[in-house]
Amino acid sequence: MEYTMRWYGPNDGVTLNDILQAGCTGVVTALHHIPVGEVWTVEEIKIRKSIVEAAGLTWTVVESLPVHEDIKKRDGKYLQWIENYKISLQNLGKNGIKVITYNFMPVLDWLRTDLFYKTPSSALALRFEWVAFVAFDLFILQRPNAKKDYDEVDKIKATNYFDTLSEKQKEDLAKACMQGLPGSKEAFSSEKILSLLNEYAGINEEKLQEHLFLFLNEIAPTCESSGLQMAIHPDDPPFPILGLPRIMSKAAHARKMLEEVPSNAIGLCFCTGSFGARKDNDLQAMFKEFASRIYFLHLRSTQRDNEGNFFEANHLEGNADLFSIVKLSIEIEQKENRTIPMRPDHGHQLKIDDQIESYPGYSFVGRLKGLAEIKGMDMAIKRMIH
Ligand code: DNO
Ligand code: MN
């Protein structure tokens, strides 16, 4: 396993040296300052690469090279954006990048209703609560179709829930749900989300899936010639929200993509936290089935309840059995003689993390704790095998 942490670039409060001291050999980063769709030039990539290498770290995984909304909808300037995407891929390949992570979630990236959920130790975790989300949709976003998308029970629960919230709690709920894209300090507004949602009116799951497969088959030859592996990140949360289609939430979705896009350059980012938020996703079975096309690992765990709610648990607790996943990764690495990059994905916000400014989920000490636990487990499993 190659140990990395996500680094948001020179503006990240967590420094490259912090990441090196934590025990990583590499970082996962992106050129967040380049607008979605524009080409990542060789010069810009080189600048980032040299900063990373000067700190004694490597950069082999990009997260994310974002896919323009026009490509997901196949409208507007999507052909231009695909051409640009290919040029960015070539430029990244020339600079030693091996894996590209991206997602195909319309409009939003990952979404939680609470960014500061207090766990029993008082460490703060990210949490998704269904009733809170319905309340957000009905009363804060006021999406025109929301009322008909939920059943009566959900609507009553959400109304009662919303009535108990103070103004401050309502504000926090709005902030959590509209936090903007990863790496961006710019939040979404209700108007912005509503207008983006409108553009997806005619696009159902089947259509979005078709658009993903077309896009991937179009870029696969470039990935092959540039020595790159595409690793799609699962939907998070892994079920439909805001009336939007979801196409990478469960085993059947991943299976279909790997069948429809046969190139080995196209594979998965196995995020145990995102896939694991669904009860019907058997993580071990999925890992075994897709192993040879898993190119990147996001290791974290979620604790679910029976109502579609979950919070991000300590890495070695909750519903995802990371011991089994690490063991399976070691087996596939040995069998196929390759190294899979990993990162501890999100971490808890510990008290001491208040001292360093970081993005939600990307605290330093909280992630370091997860990384160290996983690293110890990895070493122990290897020693037991030999
Ligand atoms: C959530 C995170 C995501 C991920 C992007 C990849 O689990 O890992 O923000 O980085 O969706 O495009
Ligand atoms: Mn993830």
Image (cartoon, rainbow, N blue to C red):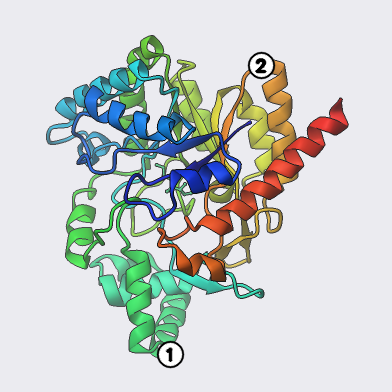
Residue 41 in sight here: no
Q: Give the amino acid type for the residue marked by disc 1 in the picture.
A: Thr
- Which sits in the foreground, 169 or 351? 351
Residue 292 in sight here: yes
Q: Give the amino acid type for the residue marked by disc 2 in the picture.
A: Glu
Q: Residue at x 36, y 65 (%)?
A: 177
Mark 1 or 2 closer to N-term? Answer: 1
| Residue 204 position in % (x across, y down) | 32, 44
Q: Quadrant of residue 68?
A: top left
| Residue 305 position in % (x across, y down) | 63, 66
- Mark pair 1, 2: CA separation: 55 Å
- Which sits in the foreground, 85 or 306? 85
- Kindly identify which residue carries mark 2: 336
Quarter of the image for the C terminus: give it: top right
Q: Residue furthest top?
A: 225
Q: Residue at x 75, y 42 (%)?
A: 377
Question: At numbered mark 2, what does the secondary structure look like: helix, strand or loop?
Answer: helix
The dot on residue 164 is: 1
Q: Residue at x 30, y 17 (%)?
A: 90
